[in-house]
Each structure stands twice: as structure tokens, then as C-alpha cells.
Amino acid sequence: MTDADPEGAYYQAVEEFFVARRGDPLMLSNADWLLIRRWREEGLPLRIVLRGIADALDAHAHSWSRQRKVGSLRYCEAEVDRARERWEHALSEGSEPGVDVGRSLEALARALASAPLGPRARPVAARAAEDLRRNQAGRPRDVEAELQAHEAALVDAIRADEPELAREVERSVELALQPYRSRLPARVMASVREQSLRRELLARQGLPRLSLFEI
């Protein structure tokens, strides 16, 4: 995608890393793109995805089948899942360097409570802030699901409060993603568009994405 679009850049980085590590050009299949979409929508940080891909391809390079090229990104799925489990365990134990999930969620709650939002978005943000302060001890996977639910509701409210802003952001996102419309499956493109819209609409309100992905 482009440097200006972090959501698109996630997909591009996974594609480029996998193709480079595999060793020769390969077009990702629709199933591969949908797998990247799942990782992104579940809030899996890019560095964790790349770590899992590297682990899978390193293991393949030392296996009996190393003469055969890996034909799909799905070959790496199990190792990415294992990398995710290690990351989530580190978050839960507080052993992820430089990361304090409770402190990060509290910072999100403060931002939500103080953002200059409209009449529909303000109570949605207040409820989200209250829930984040109450549920900081949950499993990272459950916390992420809660964050995404709050984010979806908040973005819908912002769209209702600021229809002109929403249309302006939609035009900007459509323009930024135009060069990639022919490359990505329709379902993946729809997800990239929605994630980009959320990010930009929240940023216009002085808010980050509501996600552990941002840690």
C-alpha cells in the first residue's frame, strides 16, 4: 500500500517479507490475503506475524522437504499462532519489554473520557472508558475483542455526528487505496478500507485506534 496508510502497509509488509524469505516471486492467493486479514482484524502486531513466518521458513530450510518451495502463506499459519501465544503470554505476565497493558488501557480510557466528541459519540466513549478501567485484568485476546467492539460503536457514532467529515475521510481513503483495488480480493479490500476509515476518523478526534495492536 502506501506509507501514509498504516492499514494497507500491514498487508504489504507481510506479503513482501514472505516473498523475500521464500526466495522467488510468488503471487499470494485469495486464501493467503484472507489469512492476513484475520491476523490484522484480530489485532496481531506485524512484528509477531513476521516472527512466525520467519520461524516457519527457518524450520522448512532445515527439513527433509527443503528442496520444495513453500507454496502458500498458510504454511506459516501454525508458527504465527505459536508466536501469538508467546506474545499474549508475555503481555499477561507483564514481561513484554516496554509494555504495560494496564497502563496502556488506562491511557486509552483517559483519552476517551477527554476527547472533544459530539453528542452521539460522547456517551459511547464514556461507556468504553468505564469498561476499560473495569476489565484490565482480562486475557489479551478477550481485551482485544472488547476494544474492537467499542471502537466499532464509537466510529459509528462519530460518523453520525460528523457526516461531512466522514465523507471527506472516505474520499481520502478511497484515493489512497486506489492503486491496490485490482490486487486484493474484494473482502480484503473492504476490510482495509474500513480499518483505514476507523483510524483516520479517530485521529481527527485526537484518538488512536482502540487496540492492543498499537502497543
Image (cartoon, rainbow, N blue to C red):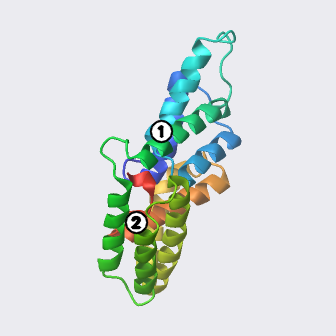
Judge by depth and name the residue closer to the eye, 205 or 192: 205
Q: Is residue 193 above or below residue 62?
A: below
> x, y percentage for residue 55?
53, 25
Query: In the picture provided, is 103 more to the left or to the right than 17?
Result: left
Q: Quadrant of residue 80?
A: top right
Element at label 2: helix
Which amino acid, mark 1? Ile
Q: Which mark is residue 106?
A: none
Which element carries disc 1, helix, strand or loop?
A: helix
Which residue shows up at 43% across the image and 83% down it? 121
Q: Position of residue 101 (x, y in %)?
A: 38, 55
Residue 96 versus residue 74: which sits nearer the camera?
A: 96
Residue assigned mark 2: 200
Name the N-terminal-most of marks 2 and 1: 1
Residue named by callout 1 = 48
The location of residue 134, given as percent across then percent down, is 44, 71
State whether residue 63 is above or below residue 179: above
Query: Where 130 sits versus 68, above or below?
Result: below
Residue type at numbered disc 2: Glu
Is there any visible trace of residue 27 in the rendered image?
no
Q: Position of residue 79 (x, y in %)?
A: 59, 31
**1 and 64: which is toward the camera:** 64
Q: Would you call the spot at circle 1 few (<14 residues within 10 Å), some (14-19), or many (20 or more)?
A: some
